[in-house]
Image (cartoon, helix red, strand yellow):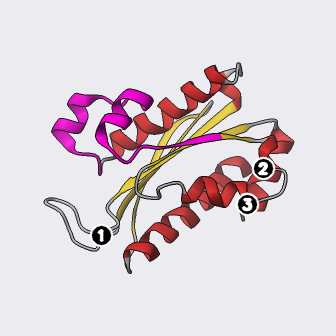
Amino acid sequence: MAEQVIALCREQELFIATAESLTGGLLASELISIPGASDVVLGSVVAYRDVIKQQLLGVSAQLIANQGTVDAEVCAQMAQGVREKFAKASALDVSSVIGVSTTGLAGPEDSPGHRAGEVFIGISSHRGITVFSEFFSGSRNEIRSASVARAIEILREHLSR
């Protein structure tokens, strides 16, 4: 499915930037494993710590303080932030860049107010920002892998509309 995402971006002259928390770079890795990905993948930020989400992606410190990072709005701000930063850094019109973000709790333990497997996947494009709330079960690595697969599926669906 990643091959389709790369091909669709190339056809539509679009670019991808990712902001990853719980997937820790796995989404970018999956995308760049496809030959020709350098035509469309601009790069990725692995924003595992709160301060990185705030400083590099522009996520509101107040939002994180109030909601934590396993949150739909945090995910939306990550997607928007990576889209804007990479468009600017690449001297591209922001309308040609899609920002994709992942945040959630991979476990194995639950945390206060959140169950392991709770995941948010965000997409920011010229069509606006959409956040998908998902729940995956399994080990930490299975949850992270399922999150990557779903993010790629969301990207493919977005590009196919």
Label 2 crowding class (10 Å Cα cut-off): few <14, some 14-19, many 20+? many
* Residue at image mark 2: 37
Say what secondary structure mark 3 lies in. loop
Horizontally, residue 142 falls left or right of residue 159, namely left
In the image, is residue 50 part of the stretch drawn in magenta? yes
Specify the label residue 107 is tagged with: 1
Q: CA distance from mark 3 to mark 2?
A: 7 Å
Q: Are marks 3 and 2 in contact (CB under 8 Å)?
A: yes
Q: Residue 24 location in percent, x, y?
A: 47, 56
> In the rendered view, would you say 68 is above or below 31?
above
Say what secondary structure mark 2 lies in. helix
Specify the label residue 33 is tagged with: 3
Quarter assignment of residue 3: bottom right
Say what secondary structure mark 1 lies in. loop
Q: Residue 72 location in percent, x, y?
A: 35, 46
Horizontally, residue 19 falls left or right of residue 119, namely right
